[in-house]
Image (cartoon, rainbow, N blue to C red):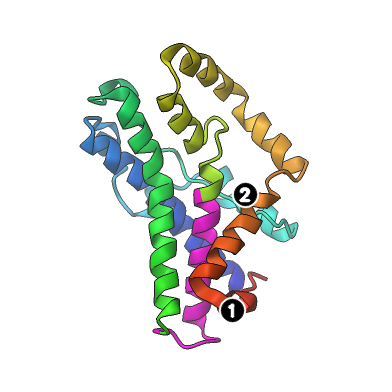
Amino acid sequence: MSLFIYFVVLIFSVTLHEVSHGWTADKCGDSTARLYKRLTLNPLAHLDLVGSVIIPIFLFLSNSPIMLGWAKPVPVNFYNLRNPKVDMIKVALAGPAANIGLALLSSMILRLGLVPQSTLLEHLLLCVVIVNFILAIFNLLPIPPLDGSKILMGILPSGLSNRYACLERFGFFILIFFVAVGALHFVVRLAFYISYFGVGERLFSFNLL
């Protein structure tokens, strides 16, 4: 049951993340995601075999402290944005912001005592809090092609931004390296630290396994 809850929460969370990117881009002038019918919360439109299924299952079964996953990126044509440099930052921030908002809403429900302790609903909401904070923090890392790199590209001068963008072709290998050496463990620790302020001691009863 815990594995099922985790995947339901993860799939919904990455779907919300991608739709938020597309919706923000649409509001900023790029209708690509809407034309490709990706502005929907139907997860079937966003699932990625590797990122949404294989990687999460592998990490879960290997008892990895980092539970990550992703959906198919929503297509965004930054050249269609009305103000490419500024709007790029808005679009990139939209995904993590949606995850943080969902995590804060869930933690507020738990903090207000609206959900009985030691229930399936409590476990579900705790999972929402943890998974969404992890997704938000991870995606804000300035490693191409993560959202943090798009934010940095929007801040850097054009010359530096273009050179930094060239790293995106090596982004997957950089991420694998960081995971392999355990350098991303702080993402999970930071997510749990932040979550504790949202849900308090209830967090100690949280166990994905």
Report whether residue 93 is seen. Answer: yes
Foreground label between 1 and 2:
1
Up the image or down, 202 lies above or below 147; here it is below
Q: Earlier in the sequence, mark 1 or mark 2?
A: 2
Give the side of residue 103 with respect to residue 61, left or right. Answer: left
Residue at x 40%, y 37% (from the top left corner): 92
* SS majority, magenta: helix
Task: Give the percent coordinates (x, y) of residue 115.
Answer: 43, 84
Up the image or down, 206 lies above or below 63; here it is below
The residue that label 1 is drawn on is 201
Query: Mark number for residue 16?
Result: none
Residue at x 44%, y 78% (from the top left corner): 111
Name the one closer to the observer, 184 or 180: 184
Report whether residue 77 is seen. Answer: no
Q: Is residue 132 magenta?
A: yes
Residue at x 33%, y 37% (from the top left corner): 90
Task: Give the percent coordinates (x, y) of residue 203.
Answer: 59, 74
Specify few, some or many for label 1: CA neighbours under 10 Å numbering under 14, 14-19, or 20 or more: few
Extreme-right residue of the structure? 181
Specify few, some or many for label 2: CA neighbours under 10 Å numbering under 14, 14-19, or 20 or more: few
The residue that label 2 is drawn on is 54
The amino acid on which the numbered mark 2 sits, given as a three-letter code, is Ile
Secondary structure of the residue carrying tag 1 is: helix
Q: Is residue 34 magenta?
A: no
Residue at x 46%, y 11% (from the top left corner): 159
Question: Which quarter of the rendering shows the C terminus?
Answer: bottom right
Which segment is the magenta one? 114-136
Task: Give the percent coordinates (x, y) of residue 34.
Answer: 25, 38
The amino acid on which the numbered mark 1 sits, given as a three-letter code, is Glu
Q: CA distance from mark 1 to mark 2?
A: 32 Å
Secondary structure of the residue carrying tag 2 is: helix
